[in-house]
Image (spheres, rainbow, N blue to C red):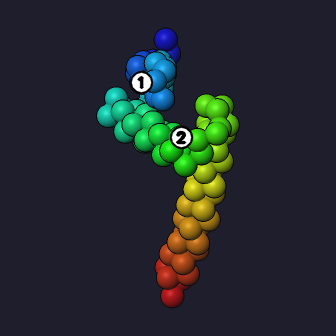
Amino acid sequence: MTEGKRRYKATIDGETYTIVGSKPQKHMQVVSETVDDQLNQLKEMTKGLDKEKRAILLAINAVSDQLAMRKELNEMKEKYKQLEQE
């Protein structure tokens, strides 16, 4: 395994996954618990959808949130630049 990489076992939606990454174990625990919670919420809201479709919806929600946060961060950086120039 590459230096700095760690293995983390997570149970998400009843399945066990081994996640490999450089983030601390606590970070990976929070991520996997968040994904599990969100999948459970989607399961309650979309009773007729299978696991794959719920996973796609979760991915769409995550990317949408990421793009919104990126836009907000860029706007804040721009405001900061303007304040520095004043």
The x and y percentages for residue 69 are 55, 61
What's the distance in space between the residues labelled 2 and 1, CA to CA? Answer: 19 Å
Question: Which is more toward the observer, 68 or 74?
Answer: 68
Identified at 61% across, 31% down, the residue is 51
Asked where in the image residue 82 lies, by quadrant, the reply is: bottom right
Which secondary structure lies at badge 1? strand
Give the labeled residue for mark 2. 43
Query: Is residue 5 among the parts visible in the rendering?
Result: no
Q: Which mark is residue 10?
A: 1
Comparing labels 2 and 1, the label whose residue is closer to the camera: 2
- Residue 36 in view here: yes
Residue 11 in picture, x, y percent from top left = 42, 24
Above or below residue 2? Residue 78 is below
Residue 64 is left or right of residue 4, and the answer is right
Q: Is residue 25 left or right of residue 40?
A: left
Q: Nearer the viewer, residue 6 or 81?
A: 6
Q: Residue furthest top?
A: 1
Mark 1: amino acid: Ala
56 to 10, vertically: above or below: below
Task: In this rendered view, identify the residue nearer to me: 53 or 33.
Answer: 53
Of labels 2 and 1, earlier in sequence is 1
Where does the image place residue 29, in percent across and percent down from the top left? 36, 33
Q: Residue at x 48, y 21 (%)?
A: 15
Between residue 62 and residue 15, name the one nearer to us: 15
Neighbour class for label 1 at 10 Å: few (<14), some, many (≥20)? some
